[in-house]
Image (tube, rainbow, N blue to C red):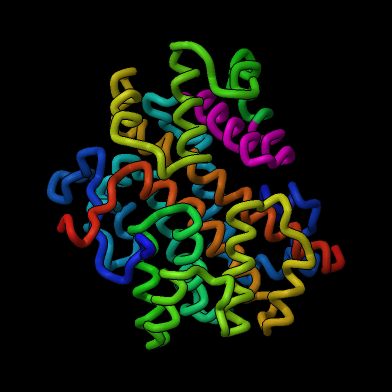
Amino acid sequence: MADLIDSLLGIAPDSPLGALRRRRPEALRHAEGAFRELLLPEDPGGLSRAERAALALRVALKEGDAALAARFRALLVAAGGAGMAAEVEAPGAPQGEGRLAALLRYADKVALAPEGTTRADLDALAAMGLTSRDIVAATQLIAFVPYQVRAIAGLRAMLQEMPR
Amino acid sequence: MSRFTLKAVGWRPRLEPVKAETATPAQLAALDACPPAQRRSAYFLTLAHDPGSLGERGALFNIVMYAEGGLPRADRELATAVVSMVNGCVFCTSVHAKRFVELTGDEPAMQRILDEGWAEEPDPRRQAVAAFTEALTRTPGAVTAEDIAKLRAAGLDELEILDLVHAVAMFANANRLMLTLGDPLLPKQM
Protein backbone atom coordinates (compact mmCIF):
# COMPACT_ATOMS: atom_id res chain seq x y z
CA MET A 1 0.00 0.00 0.00
CA ALA A 2 1.27 3.48 -0.85
CA ASP A 3 2.03 5.61 2.21
CA LEU A 4 2.22 9.38 2.64
CA ILE A 5 5.78 9.61 1.31
CA ASP A 6 5.05 7.42 -1.75
CA SER A 7 2.09 9.59 -2.57
CA LEU A 8 4.00 12.87 -2.09
CA LEU A 9 6.85 11.63 -4.30
CA GLY A 10 4.56 10.03 -6.86
CA ILE A 11 6.15 6.60 -6.60
CA ALA A 12 4.48 3.19 -6.67
CA PRO A 13 5.22 0.67 -3.92
CA ASP A 14 6.62 -1.73 -6.55
CA SER A 15 8.83 0.89 -8.24
CA PRO A 16 12.59 0.60 -7.53
CA LEU A 17 12.52 3.29 -4.82
CA GLY A 18 9.22 2.01 -3.42
CA ALA A 19 10.71 -1.48 -3.19
CA LEU A 20 13.88 -0.14 -1.57
CA ARG A 21 11.81 1.68 1.07
CA ARG A 22 10.06 -1.63 1.81
CA ARG A 23 13.37 -3.19 2.82
CA ARG A 24 12.83 -1.13 5.98
CA PRO A 25 9.14 -1.97 6.54
CA GLU A 26 9.19 -1.05 10.24
CA ALA A 27 10.50 2.42 9.45
CA LEU A 28 7.49 2.97 7.18
CA ARG A 29 5.06 1.47 9.66
CA HIS A 30 6.24 3.48 12.65
CA ALA A 31 6.57 6.74 10.71
CA GLU A 32 2.93 6.27 9.71
CA GLY A 33 2.12 5.37 13.30
CA ALA A 34 3.78 8.49 14.65
CA PHE A 35 1.90 10.57 12.09
CA ARG A 36 -1.40 9.02 13.21
CA GLU A 37 -0.70 9.43 16.94
CA LEU A 38 0.42 13.04 16.53
CA LEU A 39 -2.05 14.34 13.93
CA LEU A 40 -5.08 12.09 14.36
CA PRO A 41 -5.01 10.71 17.92
CA GLU A 42 -8.16 9.02 19.19
CA ASP A 43 -7.93 11.13 22.33
CA PRO A 44 -6.27 14.44 21.44
CA GLY A 45 -6.26 15.64 25.07
CA GLY A 46 -5.99 19.42 25.37
CA LEU A 47 -4.49 19.94 21.92
CA SER A 48 -7.23 19.64 19.30
CA ARG A 49 -6.78 17.92 15.96
CA ALA A 50 -7.17 21.29 14.26
CA GLU A 51 -4.42 22.80 16.42
CA ARG A 52 -2.21 19.81 15.67
CA ALA A 53 -2.73 20.23 11.93
CA ALA A 54 -2.05 23.95 12.30
CA LEU A 55 1.30 23.30 14.03
CA ALA A 56 2.34 20.76 11.39
CA LEU A 57 1.35 23.12 8.57
CA ARG A 58 3.35 25.91 10.15
CA VAL A 59 6.51 23.78 10.41
CA ALA A 60 6.18 22.37 6.86
CA LEU A 61 5.88 25.93 5.53
CA LYS A 62 8.85 27.16 7.57
CA GLU A 63 10.87 24.16 6.34
CA GLY A 64 9.92 25.01 2.78
CA ASP A 65 8.17 21.74 1.83
CA ALA A 66 5.11 22.90 -0.13
CA ALA A 67 3.81 19.41 -0.94
CA LEU A 68 3.87 18.31 2.69
CA ALA A 69 2.33 21.64 3.72
CA ALA A 70 -0.57 21.01 1.32
CA ARG A 71 -1.31 17.72 3.10
CA PHE A 72 -1.41 19.44 6.47
CA ARG A 73 -3.59 22.25 5.06
CA ALA A 74 -6.09 19.59 3.95
CA LEU A 75 -5.96 18.00 7.42
CA LEU A 76 -6.54 21.41 8.99
CA VAL A 77 -9.63 21.96 6.87
CA ALA A 78 -10.88 18.42 7.55
CA ALA A 79 -10.49 19.05 11.30
CA GLY A 80 -12.68 22.15 11.05
CA GLY A 81 -9.75 24.56 11.35
CA ALA A 82 -10.06 26.38 8.01
CA GLY A 83 -10.52 29.61 9.96
CA MET A 84 -7.01 29.24 11.41
CA ALA A 85 -5.28 28.93 8.05
CA ALA A 86 -4.65 32.64 7.46
CA GLU A 87 -2.95 33.09 10.84
CA VAL A 88 -0.92 29.89 10.40
CA GLU A 89 0.25 30.88 6.92
CA ALA A 90 0.99 34.54 7.66
CA PRO A 91 4.67 35.28 7.01
CA GLY A 92 6.85 36.62 9.80
CA ALA A 93 6.49 36.16 13.53
CA PRO A 94 2.99 35.26 14.79
CA GLN A 95 1.28 38.37 16.14
CA GLY A 96 -1.09 38.72 19.05
CA GLU A 97 -1.72 37.25 22.46
CA GLY A 98 -4.12 34.48 21.47
CA ARG A 99 -3.61 30.77 22.05
CA LEU A 100 -2.97 29.99 18.39
CA ALA A 101 -0.34 32.74 18.11
CA ALA A 102 1.43 31.37 21.19
CA LEU A 103 1.39 27.83 19.77
CA LEU A 104 2.76 29.08 16.45
CA ARG A 105 5.54 31.03 18.17
CA TYR A 106 6.47 27.84 20.00
CA ALA A 107 6.46 25.91 16.71
CA ASP A 108 8.76 28.45 15.07
CA LYS A 109 11.24 28.29 17.95
CA VAL A 110 11.33 24.49 18.19
CA ALA A 111 11.51 23.99 14.43
CA LEU A 112 13.93 26.77 13.49
CA ALA A 113 15.98 27.60 16.58
CA PRO A 114 15.61 24.78 19.11
CA GLU A 115 18.89 25.66 20.82
CA GLY A 116 17.34 29.00 21.79
CA THR A 117 14.39 27.52 23.66
CA THR A 118 14.20 27.83 27.45
CA ARG A 119 12.09 26.53 30.28
CA ALA A 120 10.07 29.74 30.03
CA ASP A 121 8.76 28.61 26.63
CA LEU A 122 7.26 25.50 28.24
CA ASP A 123 6.01 27.49 31.24
CA ALA A 124 4.17 29.84 28.86
CA LEU A 125 2.31 26.89 27.34
CA ALA A 126 1.46 25.55 30.79
CA ALA A 127 0.16 28.98 31.79
CA MET A 128 -2.31 28.78 28.86
CA GLY A 129 -3.69 25.56 30.34
CA LEU A 130 -1.69 22.98 28.42
CA THR A 131 -0.92 19.86 30.46
CA SER A 132 2.46 18.12 30.42
CA ARG A 133 0.96 15.62 27.98
CA ASP A 134 -0.21 18.44 25.67
CA ILE A 135 3.22 20.10 25.80
CA VAL A 136 5.04 16.85 25.03
CA ALA A 137 2.57 16.09 22.21
CA ALA A 138 3.01 19.56 20.70
CA THR A 139 6.81 19.23 20.90
CA GLN A 140 6.81 15.71 19.43
CA LEU A 141 4.60 16.93 16.59
CA ILE A 142 6.68 20.02 15.84
CA ALA A 143 9.85 17.87 15.92
CA PHE A 144 8.33 15.14 13.75
CA VAL A 145 7.73 17.33 10.71
CA PRO A 146 11.50 18.04 10.32
CA TYR A 147 11.94 14.23 10.23
CA GLN A 148 9.43 13.97 7.41
CA VAL A 149 10.92 16.91 5.52
CA ARG A 150 14.41 15.35 5.51
CA ALA A 151 13.21 11.83 4.75
CA ILE A 152 11.24 13.21 1.79
CA ALA A 153 14.14 15.41 0.62
CA GLY A 154 16.62 12.55 0.71
CA LEU A 155 14.25 10.21 -1.12
CA ARG A 156 13.45 12.87 -3.71
CA ALA A 157 17.16 13.18 -4.48
CA MET A 158 17.46 9.38 -4.73
CA LEU A 159 14.47 9.32 -7.07
CA GLN A 160 16.24 11.69 -9.46
CA GLU A 161 18.69 8.95 -10.32
CA MET A 162 16.24 6.03 -10.28
CA PRO A 163 13.46 5.05 -12.68
CA ARG A 164 9.95 5.47 -11.25
CA MET B 1 38.17 24.81 21.85
CA SER B 2 34.91 23.29 20.73
CA ARG B 3 32.05 22.88 23.23
CA PHE B 4 31.44 19.36 21.88
CA THR B 5 32.89 16.57 23.97
CA LEU B 6 33.30 12.81 24.30
CA LYS B 7 32.84 13.20 28.05
CA ALA B 8 29.50 12.18 29.52
CA VAL B 9 26.96 15.03 29.34
CA GLY B 10 23.84 14.89 31.48
CA TRP B 11 20.32 16.07 30.70
CA ARG B 12 17.82 17.72 33.04
CA PRO B 13 14.19 17.81 31.93
CA ARG B 14 12.25 21.07 31.95
CA LEU B 15 9.02 19.18 32.76
CA GLU B 16 8.55 16.83 35.68
CA PRO B 17 9.01 13.33 34.15
CA VAL B 18 6.51 10.52 34.60
CA LYS B 19 7.46 8.29 37.56
CA ALA B 20 7.98 4.66 36.58
CA GLU B 21 6.19 3.45 39.69
CA THR B 22 3.03 5.44 38.99
CA ALA B 23 3.06 5.21 35.17
CA THR B 24 -0.13 4.05 33.44
CA PRO B 25 -0.20 0.77 31.50
CA ALA B 26 -0.16 2.78 28.25
CA GLN B 27 2.91 4.70 29.39
CA LEU B 28 4.72 1.49 30.40
CA ALA B 29 3.89 -0.16 27.07
CA ALA B 30 5.23 2.86 25.20
CA LEU B 31 8.45 2.82 27.24
CA ASP B 32 8.90 -0.87 26.38
CA ALA B 33 9.15 0.10 22.69
CA CYS B 34 12.23 2.27 23.42
CA PRO B 35 15.88 1.13 23.47
CA PRO B 36 16.24 -1.10 26.56
CA ALA B 37 19.19 0.78 28.06
CA GLN B 38 17.30 4.08 28.07
CA ARG B 39 13.75 3.09 29.03
CA ARG B 40 14.01 4.56 32.50
CA SER B 41 16.00 7.66 31.52
CA ALA B 42 14.65 11.10 32.40
CA TYR B 43 14.27 11.77 28.67
CA PHE B 44 12.01 8.81 27.89
CA LEU B 45 10.08 9.27 31.15
CA THR B 46 9.41 12.87 30.06
CA LEU B 47 8.23 11.75 26.62
CA ALA B 48 5.99 9.18 28.37
CA HIS B 49 3.55 11.99 29.20
CA ASP B 50 2.24 11.34 25.66
CA PRO B 51 2.45 7.55 25.34
CA GLY B 52 0.94 7.34 21.87
CA SER B 53 3.67 9.37 20.23
CA LEU B 54 6.44 7.88 22.41
CA GLY B 55 5.57 4.30 21.43
CA GLU B 56 5.57 4.90 17.70
CA ARG B 57 8.45 7.35 17.69
CA GLY B 58 10.52 5.13 20.01
CA ALA B 59 9.99 2.16 17.69
CA LEU B 60 10.94 4.30 14.69
CA PHE B 61 14.11 5.47 16.44
CA ASN B 62 15.04 1.86 17.27
CA ILE B 63 14.73 0.62 13.72
CA VAL B 64 16.53 3.62 12.24
CA MET B 65 19.51 3.23 14.56
CA TYR B 66 19.69 -0.54 14.97
CA ALA B 67 18.14 -2.27 11.91
CA GLU B 68 20.33 -5.12 10.71
CA GLY B 69 22.31 -4.88 7.50
CA GLY B 70 22.56 -1.76 5.41
CA LEU B 71 24.56 1.15 6.77
CA PRO B 72 27.13 0.04 9.38
CA ARG B 73 26.23 1.24 12.85
CA ALA B 74 29.43 3.28 13.08
CA ASP B 75 28.32 5.33 10.08
CA ARG B 76 24.89 5.89 11.67
CA GLU B 77 26.58 7.10 14.84
CA LEU B 78 28.89 9.36 12.82
CA ALA B 79 25.92 10.85 10.98
CA THR B 80 23.87 11.41 14.11
CA ALA B 81 26.84 13.01 15.87
CA VAL B 82 27.27 15.36 12.89
CA VAL B 83 23.56 16.29 12.81
CA SER B 84 23.75 16.96 16.55
CA MET B 85 26.76 19.26 16.10
CA VAL B 86 25.02 21.18 13.30
CA ASN B 87 21.92 21.60 15.49
CA GLY B 88 23.97 22.50 18.58
CA CYS B 89 22.86 19.54 20.72
CA VAL B 90 25.84 18.97 23.01
CA PHE B 91 24.09 16.12 24.81
CA CYS B 92 23.20 14.11 21.68
CA THR B 93 26.64 14.76 20.22
CA SER B 94 28.38 13.31 23.25
CA VAL B 95 26.21 10.18 23.25
CA HIS B 96 26.64 9.37 19.57
CA ALA B 97 30.28 10.42 19.33
CA LYS B 98 31.01 7.99 22.16
CA ARG B 99 29.10 5.17 20.42
CA PHE B 100 31.11 5.83 17.26
CA VAL B 101 34.32 5.46 19.28
CA GLU B 102 33.05 2.26 20.93
CA LEU B 103 32.25 0.76 17.53
CA THR B 104 35.39 1.85 15.67
CA GLY B 105 38.00 2.21 18.41
CA ASP B 106 39.02 5.39 16.58
CA GLU B 107 38.87 8.07 19.26
CA PRO B 108 41.36 10.41 17.56
CA ALA B 109 39.14 10.59 14.43
CA MET B 110 36.05 11.54 16.45
CA GLN B 111 37.95 13.96 18.69
CA ARG B 112 39.20 15.73 15.56
CA ILE B 113 35.65 15.98 14.20
CA LEU B 114 34.41 17.37 17.52
CA ASP B 115 37.22 19.93 17.63
CA GLU B 116 37.58 20.91 13.99
CA GLY B 117 34.55 19.61 12.08
CA TRP B 118 34.61 17.35 9.04
CA ALA B 119 35.75 19.62 6.20
CA GLU B 120 39.27 18.15 6.37
CA GLU B 121 38.19 14.59 7.27
CA PRO B 122 40.86 12.36 5.70
CA ASP B 123 38.74 9.18 5.38
CA PRO B 124 36.81 9.58 2.10
CA ARG B 125 33.80 7.52 3.19
CA ARG B 126 33.44 9.39 6.50
CA GLN B 127 33.93 12.68 4.68
CA ALA B 128 31.15 11.84 2.21
CA VAL B 129 28.79 10.69 4.97
CA ALA B 130 29.44 13.82 7.04
CA ALA B 131 29.10 16.24 4.09
CA PHE B 132 25.80 14.69 2.97
CA THR B 133 24.57 14.71 6.55
CA GLU B 134 25.30 18.41 6.94
CA ALA B 135 23.61 19.26 3.63
CA LEU B 136 20.43 17.29 4.38
CA THR B 137 20.29 18.79 7.87
CA ARG B 138 20.83 22.42 6.88
CA THR B 139 19.19 22.67 3.45
CA PRO B 140 17.00 19.63 2.77
CA GLY B 141 15.31 21.29 -0.20
CA ALA B 142 18.67 21.78 -1.96
CA VAL B 143 19.82 18.14 -1.83
CA THR B 144 19.94 16.56 -5.31
CA ALA B 145 21.07 13.46 -7.19
CA GLU B 146 24.56 15.00 -7.27
CA ASP B 147 24.78 14.61 -3.50
CA ILE B 148 23.60 11.00 -3.81
CA ALA B 149 26.24 10.38 -6.50
CA LYS B 150 28.99 11.46 -4.08
CA LEU B 151 27.79 8.85 -1.58
CA ARG B 152 27.81 6.18 -4.27
CA ALA B 153 31.33 7.24 -5.28
CA ALA B 154 32.39 6.77 -1.66
CA GLY B 155 31.09 3.20 -1.80
CA LEU B 156 27.60 3.40 -0.29
CA ASP B 157 24.94 1.20 -1.87
CA GLU B 158 21.29 2.18 -2.10
CA LEU B 159 20.17 0.54 1.17
CA GLU B 160 23.04 2.26 2.97
CA ILE B 161 21.98 5.59 1.47
CA LEU B 162 18.38 5.00 2.56
CA ASP B 163 19.57 4.18 6.09
CA LEU B 164 21.69 7.35 6.12
CA VAL B 165 18.70 9.47 5.06
CA HIS B 166 16.63 7.92 7.84
CA ALA B 167 19.36 8.50 10.45
CA VAL B 168 19.80 12.15 9.47
CA ALA B 169 16.04 12.70 9.48
CA MET B 170 15.68 10.97 12.88
CA PHE B 171 18.09 13.40 14.47
CA ALA B 172 16.36 16.44 13.07
CA ASN B 173 13.66 15.08 15.36
CA ALA B 174 15.76 13.86 18.30
CA ASN B 175 17.82 17.05 18.66
CA ARG B 176 14.70 19.22 18.70
CA LEU B 177 13.14 17.11 21.45
CA MET B 178 16.31 17.12 23.57
CA LEU B 179 17.01 20.83 23.10
CA THR B 180 13.45 21.85 23.88
CA LEU B 181 12.37 19.52 26.68
CA GLY B 182 15.54 19.79 28.78
CA ASP B 183 18.94 21.33 29.42
CA PRO B 184 22.34 19.67 28.99
CA LEU B 185 24.45 19.25 32.11
CA LEU B 186 28.03 19.78 31.05
CA PRO B 187 30.80 17.72 32.73
CA LYS B 188 31.88 20.59 34.99
CA GLN B 189 28.28 21.01 36.24
CA MET B 190 27.84 17.33 37.15
Q: Classify the position of the N terminus of chain B by image quarter.
A: bottom left
Secondary structure, magenta segment, majority class: helix
Q: Is residue A53 magenta?
A: yes
Q: Residue at x 39, y 52 (%)?
A: B55
From the viewer's perspective, tell me whether residue A162 is left or right of residue B10.
Answer: right
Q: Position of residue A161 (x, y in %)?
A: 83, 68
Note whether A138 is above or below B88 in the view shown: above
Q: Position of residue B41 (x, y in %)?
A: 23, 57
From the viewer's perspective, tell me whether residue B36 is left or right of residue B92.
Answer: left
Viewer can see residue B30:
yes
To which quarter of the image does residue B8 belong? Answer: bottom left
Q: Classify the position of the C terminus of chain B by image quarter.
A: bottom left
Extreme residue in the left direction: B21
Q: Residue at x 30, y 55 (%)?
A: B31
Q: Position of residue B134 (x, y in %)?
A: 59, 61
Residue range of the region highlighted in magenta in the rendering? A48-72
From the viewer's perspective, tell me whether residue B122 is left or right of residue B53.
Answer: right
Q: Give whichever of B124, A39 is nearer the camera.
A: B124
Q: Is residue B76 magenta?
A: no
Extreme residue in the right direction: A163
Q: Give whichever of A64, B127 is nearer the camera.
A: B127
Q: Residue at x 42, y 30 (%)?
A: A44
Q: Position of residue A119 (x, y in %)?
A: 29, 34
Note whether A83 is above or below A79 in the view shown: above
